[in-house]
């Protein structure tokens, strides 16, 4: 059997027999390897090293990390257990700074933990809540897919950047979830995936995931975004997000801003798909921390060195796309349209 065949019921991250099971995304597309963790420190490490990545997937992984921490703790009182969970929370939180879903997942679990009174109740509720978050993630993606699919037409070619697919979530995906739902609604569509240097989530994960699921997908180097748009190869763009602030500024994989700017230049609609757990209604755009990653991601490809020794490298993992470049933000509560400050507020008011 091909060892990279992914069954559609497979989850990127799940809880089984008091352990966290994940697909090791650093090994894709060459090998499908599952890792199994029983220590929250291993989960923190997995988030940091991109074994698991993508905003919703790391949100759920953080929650599962706290579930492991609750089992690892030897505390016999509620206060003792909460204190151990707080320590684990800090370690998990400090893994990656940009995707707000991680904070959302950790905060949700801590709220549940604090609401229980005994050590046993806390453990049970924390595990149940983390499992529920994983199940809900899939449901939310499917709902987003339904709202988003109406924005796409038969015979569209849709460009996407990075990986906002099943592999970035528990399953189904956000941006790729909308693409899946569009096909499920009977429309014939093609996809263009950017390579997404330097970590290559586009070629390693998106192209792999879509090809595996039988989509007509073409891979382009990031440098061919302008060419593709100028030559009429793209009708629409859809990407995911790591954080969206209340003004509609979208933080997503480095290069998203370039794709959005180019789309504006060519009059191509640019959509973002993200669950409400990706919204940060408190921070201002200028306060969001952009993760800077190590230079070796840029100075080589695989084991091959592609830059001179000791070169200075600037390697931001994310950038910010301003609201004026965005045609709509697809969520599980509907599609927000400009002006975003109002439409985003309405999404939250309507449901909380
Ligand atoms: O560094 P990564 O791979 O975690 O970055 C992922 C992205 O930027 C995705 O586009 C984003 O998390 C949306 S995933 C549904």
Image (cartoon, grey):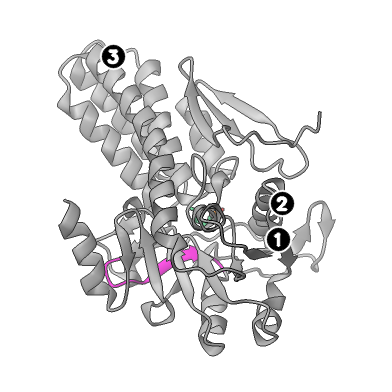
Q: Residue furthest right?
A: 304
Foreground residue among 22 and 138: 138
Question: At x 44% / y 65%, what residue is drawn?
Answer: 150
Foreground residue among 225 and 310: 225
Vertical comparison of 262 with 81: above or below: below
The residue beneath circle 3 is 75
Horizontal relation, residue 144 to residue 43: left or right: left
Label drawn at residue 211: 2
Question: At x 34% / y 72%, what residue is drawn?
Answer: 286
Binning the other alpha carbons within 10 Å of mark 1 as few (below 14), some (14 to 19) or many (20 upward) gives many
Label drawn at residue 193: none
Vertical comparison of 218 with 105: above or below: below
Question: At x 73% / y 64%, what residue is drawn?
Answer: 218
First in sequence: mark 3 vs mark 1: 3
SS category of the residue bearing label 1:
strand
Residue 296 visible in the picture: no
- Is residue 34 on the magenta stretch? no
Q: CA distance from mark 3 to mark 1?
A: 52 Å
Q: Position of residue 146 (x, y in %)?
A: 41, 55
First in sequence: mark 3 vs mark 2: 3
Horizontal relation, residue 293 to residue 30: left or right: left
Asked whether the beta carbons under mark 3 and mark 1 sit within 8 Å of each other, the answer is no
The residue beneath circle 1 is 217
State the extent of the magenta-drawn residues as a range: 245-254
Q: Position of residue 121 (x, y in %)?
A: 23, 15
Q: Position of residue 267 (x, y in %)?
A: 52, 87
Q: Residue furthest front?
A: 186
SS category of the residue bearing label 3:
loop
Asked whether the beta carbons under mark 2 and mark 1 sit within 8 Å of each other, the answer is yes
Q: Which label sits in the foreground, 3 or 2?
A: 2
Q: CA distance from mark 3 to mark 2?
A: 48 Å
* Number of on-image labels: 3
């Amino acid at each position: 059997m091909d060892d990279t065949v992914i069954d559609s019921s497979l989850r990127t991250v799940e809880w089984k027999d008091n352990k966290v099971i994940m697909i090791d995304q650093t090994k894709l597309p060459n090998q499908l390897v599952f890792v199994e963790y029983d220590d929250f420190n291993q989960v923190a490490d997995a988030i940091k090293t991109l074994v698991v990545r993508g905003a919703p997937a790391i949100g759920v992984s953080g929650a599962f990390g706290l579930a492991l921490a609750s089992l690892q703790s030897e505390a016999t009182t509620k206060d003792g257990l909460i204190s151990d969970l707080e320590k684990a929370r800090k370690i998990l939180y400090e893994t990656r700074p940009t995707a707000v879903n991680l904070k959302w997942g950790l905060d949700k679990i801590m709220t549940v933990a604090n609401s229980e009174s005994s050590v046993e109740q806390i453990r049970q509720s924390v595990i149940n809540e983390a499992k529920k978050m994983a199940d809900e993630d899939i449901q939310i993606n499917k709902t987003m897919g339904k709202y988003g699919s109406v924005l796409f037409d038969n015979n569209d070619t849709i460009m996407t950047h990075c990986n906002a697919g099943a592999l970035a979530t528990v399953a189904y995906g956000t941006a790729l979830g909308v693409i899946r739902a569009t096909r499920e609604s009977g429309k014939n569509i093609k996809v263009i995936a950017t390579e997404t240097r330097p970590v290559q989530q586009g070629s390693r994960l998106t192209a792999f995931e879509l090809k595996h699921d039988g989509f007509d997908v073409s891979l382009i180097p990031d440098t061919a975004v302008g060419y593709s748009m100028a030559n009429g190869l793209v009708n629409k763009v859809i990407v995911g997000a790591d954080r969206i602030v209340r003004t509609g500024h979208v933080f997503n994989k480095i290069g998203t801003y370039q794709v959005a700017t180019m789309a504006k230049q060519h009059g191509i609609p640019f959509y973002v798909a993200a669950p409400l757990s990706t919204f940060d209604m408190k921070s201002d755009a200028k306060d969001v921390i952009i993760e800077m990653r190590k230079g070796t991601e840029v100075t080589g490809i695989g084991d091959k060195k592609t830059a001179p020794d000791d070169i200075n490298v600037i390697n931001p993992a994310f950038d910010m796309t301003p609201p004026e470049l965005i045609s709509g933000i697809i969520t599980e509560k509907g599609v927000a349209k400009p002006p975003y400050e109002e439409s985003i507020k309405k999404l939250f008011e309507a449901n909380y």
